[in-house]
């Protein structure tokens, strides 16, 4: 699987009352990297005809990030079936192996006009592949 990465630095607006990154911010970062991955890889013609919606997030919080921590966010597609894909997102303190968050999110592919689910094609699966076959 091809991994898409992004780094950011924790700022004051990311923090909760305990001075740790707020859980809601992690959810936002999960959605942001997912969208960035799609927009970076998918041709515009495909992007114009389909949309992705979240069916569920399963998030495991492992450790807390604090102000000014550098965060490495990694994502990849774990599998696809029908109109559903499972995306993994992991967040680490950059430069370390300290896992902060690991999530599995199920996304559903919809036709942009009808908003009805559509099967994920081989072409779309190929967008996220590094040459290895994605499980279906």
Image: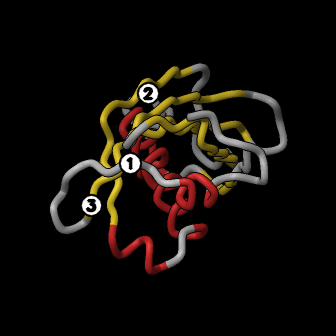
**SS for tag 3?**
strand
Q: Which mark is residue 119?
A: 1
Between marks 2 and 1, how big is the CA–CA gap? 43 Å
Front of the two marks 3 and 2: 3
Residue bearing the label numbered 3: 111
- Please tell me which residue is depicted at 15% across the width and 62% down the height of the picture: 114
Per the model, the C-alpha gap separating discs 3 and 2 is 42 Å
The answer to whether residue 78 is above or below residue 121 is above
Residue located at (71% from left, 42% from top): 133
The image shows residue 94 at horizontal and vertical percentages of 76, 44
Q: Position of residue 95 (x, y in %)?
A: 84, 43
The residue that disc 2 covers is 18
Q: In this view, does 78 lie to the left or right of 2?
A: left
> What is the quadrant of residue 37 in the picture?
bottom right
- Counting residues from the start of the chain, the first of labels 2 and 1 encountered is 2
For the point 65% across and 40% down, the residue is: 134
Q: In which quarter of the image is the N terminus?
A: top right
Identify whether 86 is placed above or below 129.
above
Counting residues from the start of the chain, the first of labels 3 and 1 encountered is 3
Looking at the rendered image, the quarter that the C terminus falls into is top right
């Amino acid at each position: 699987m091809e991994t898409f990465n992004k780094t950011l630095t924790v700022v004051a607006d990311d923090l909760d009352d305990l001075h740790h990154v707020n859980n809601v911010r992690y959810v936002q970062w999960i959605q942001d990297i997912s969208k960035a991955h799609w927009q970076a890889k998918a041709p515009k013609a495909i992007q114009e005809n389909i949309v992705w919606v979240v069916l569920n997030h399963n998030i495991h919080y492992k450790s807390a990030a604090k102000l000014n921590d550098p965060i490495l966010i990694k994502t990849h597609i774990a599998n696809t079936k029908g109109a559903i894909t499972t995306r993994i997102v992991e967040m680490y303190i950059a430069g370390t192996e300290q896992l902060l968050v690991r999530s599995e999110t199920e996304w559903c592919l919809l036709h942009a006009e009808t908003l009805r689910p559509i099967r994920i094609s081989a072409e779309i699966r190929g967008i996220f592949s590094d040459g290895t076959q994605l499980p279906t």
